[in-house]
Amino acid sequence: MTLLTFLLWIVVIILDTVGQISFKVAATKSVTNTGKQYWLSLFYQPWVWLGIAAYFSQFLLWMAFITIVPLSKAILLASFNMISVMIVGRILFKEYITPLRQLGIVLITAGVMLVGVF
């Protein structure tokens, strides 16, 4: 894996994580939880716009990433975002990571390492 490929991969993972976390923060800060008012309140949340910007940026970098990495390899490398989102969710929102999810983190990490090496 070249340095450019590695950097694109890392930034794509970071942007995906920022997007997911931003949407979670916006959803938990919403003043109402029902119907039309909920969706309107989300529209005014800066966190939603940060998430949208992160996803748009991720899309552009993902397109660059898959031009230089075979899709079959790229999609496996992108699965690392599940780990980053779980870890950041644990840190910021005190979400519990079950033993089965911990095992999943280990297996995904091992798979990503194998894919990245070969």
Image (cartoon, rainbow, N blue to C red):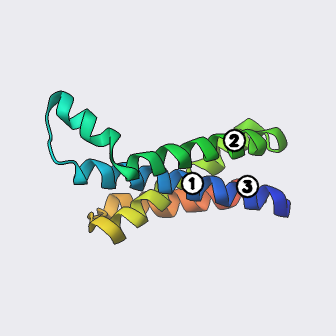
Residue under the point 56% across and 61% down: 109
* Mark before the other along the chain sequence, 1 or 3: 3
Quarter occupied by the C terminus: bottom right
Kindly identify the amino acid type of the residue bearing the numbered disc 1. Answer: Leu
Quadrant for residue 5, please give it.
bottom right
Q: Nearer the viewer, residue 34 or 6?
A: 34
| Left/right of residue 43 with respect to residue 78 in the rendered view | left
Q: Which dot marks residue 4?
A: none
Can you see residue 112? yes
In this rendering, is residue 78 above or below 6?
above
- Residue 21, percent from left and from top: 40, 56
**Element at badge 1?**
helix
- The residue at which mark 2 appears reads as 60
Q: Do tag 1 and tag 2 residues touch (Cβ < 8 Å)?
A: no
Kindly identify the amino acid type of the residue bearing the numbered disc 2. Answer: Leu
| Left/right of residue 65 with respect to residue 89 in the rendered view | right
**Element at badge 2?**
helix
Of marks 3 and 2, the one in the foreground: 2
Quarter occupied by the N terminus: bottom right
How far is disc 1 from disc 2 in space, using C-alphas? 11 Å
* Mark before the other along the chain sequence, 3 or 2: 3
In this rendering, is residue 62 above or below 114?
above
Can you see residue 102? no
* Mark before the other along the chain sequence, 1 or 2: 1
- The residue at which mark 3 appears reads as 8
How far is disc 1 from disc 3 in space, using C-alphas? 10 Å
Q: Which dot marks residue 15?
A: 1
**Alpha-carbon neighbours of circle 2 within 10 Å: few (<14), some, or many (≥20)?**
few
Q: Do tag 1 and tag 3 residues touch (Cβ < 8 Å)?
A: no
How far is disc 3 from disc 2 in space, using C-alphas? 10 Å
**Element at badge 3?**
helix
